Amino acid sequence: MTLNVRVSGALGEFVARNVGNDGAYENVSEYVRDLIRRDRERAEAEGFERLKAELTAAFAAPESAYQPLDAETIIARNARN
């Protein structure tokens, strides 16, 4: 996939400071790929935290609060989230 993005003003200056001899990245493409990887990791971590919170609440609930669910119900519920 090839992306073309125009960044100007303060954002362009910020990118320029992070690329090249004085920056952490050799080129803009490397910088953008790293940002995308970090965003993917953040999204995966958020998903894991939601799952962990749901499981923690489920295991803390009294057994009388449990309801039988079939796979179709669970899949449909997860598709909405």
Image (cartoon, rainbow, N blue to C red):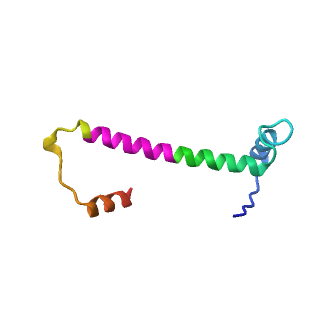
- Which image quadrant for residue 16? top right
> Which residue is found at the position 66% from the left and 46% from the top?
35
Left or right relative to 53: residue 43: right
Which percent across, then down, holds residue 11? 74, 45
4 vs 18: above or below: below
| Residue 30 visible at all | yes
Left or right relative to 26: residue 57: left
> Which residue is found at the position 43% from the left and 44% from the top?
48
In the image, residue 52 lies in the stretch drawn in magenta = yes
Q: Which residues are magenta?
A: 44-58
60 vs 50: above or below: above
Q: Residue furthest left?
A: 64
Quadrant where the N terminus sits is bottom right
In the image, residue 3 lies in the stretch drawn in magenta = no
> Which residue is found at the position 27% from the left and 61% from the top?
71
Which percent across, then down, holds residue 59? 25, 39
Q: Nearer the viewer, residue 18 or 66?
A: 66
9 vs 17: above or below: below
Left or right relative to 27: residue 50: left
Principal secondary structure, stretch drawn in magenta: helix
Q: Count of labels shown? A: 0
Q: Residue furthest front?
A: 71
Q: Residue furthest right?
A: 21
Quadrant where the C terminus sits is bottom left
> Which residue is found at the position 26% from the left and 42% from the top?
58
- Which image quadrant for residue 54? top left
Which percent across, then down, holds residue 14? 76, 41
| Residue 8 visible at all | no
Which percent across, then down, holds residue 24? 77, 37
